Amino acid sequence: MWTETLLGVPLIFWGLLCLAIAVAYYFFWPKPGPKRLTPRSLREHIVLRYFHSLVWVLLAVGAFLGAFGAGATGRWVALLAIPVYIVFLVSVIRDHNKEEAARAARRAGAGNRDMGAPL
C-alpha cells in the first residue's frame, strides 16, 4: 500500500512536500506593491492569490491517491495541475505587463508635462 515511489522516494513523502509548498505559497504570493498603479480585477486577484497553491494541492492529492493504490486517478488529478499552472503563469505575465504599461504611460505623460507640451 505505501510502497509506491517516485524517483525512489515514497509518494507519501512527495505528497507531504507538495502540501508544505502549497501552504508556503498560500502565505507568500505575488502581492501588489504599495506603489502599484493599476488595480487588479477580482479574477486576477483570485488567480494570483490561490492558483499556485492549488497546483501544489493537486499534486499532493495525486501523490496521496497514488500512494493508496489509486494510481490512475492520482495521475489524472496531478495532470490537472498543468492547466491550472498555465493559467497562473499567464496571469502573472499579464499582470506584470499591465503594470509596466501603466508605468510607461505615466513616464510618457510626465515627460510631456516637463517639456511644456499639452497632454
Image (spheres, rainbow, N blue to C red):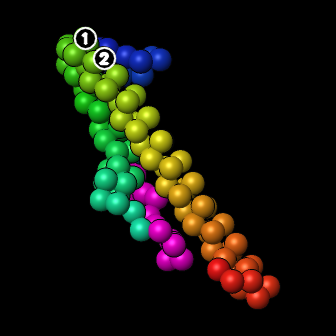
Residue 18, given in percent of the width and then of the height, sits at 36, 37
Q: Position of residue 61 (x, y in %)?
A: 25, 30
Q: Residue 98 location in percent, x, y?
A: 53, 58
Relative placement, left or right, of 67 versus 79 is left
Quick one: label 1, few (<14), some, or many (20+) residues within 10 Å? Answer: few
Nearer the observer, 74 or 118:
118
> Which image quadrant for residue 58?
top left
Which circle marks residue 75 in the picture?
2
Instruction: Count up the numbered dots.
Output: 2
Mark 2 and mark 1 in contact (Cβ < 8 Å)? yes
Specify the quadrant that holds the N terminus.
Answer: top left
Q: Is residue 37 magenta?
A: yes
Q: Nearer the viewer, residue 65 or 9?
A: 65
The percent position of residue 51, horizontal first and vertical second, equals 34, 45
| Residue 65 in which image quadrant | top left
Task: Find the magenta span and give its range.
Answer: 24-38
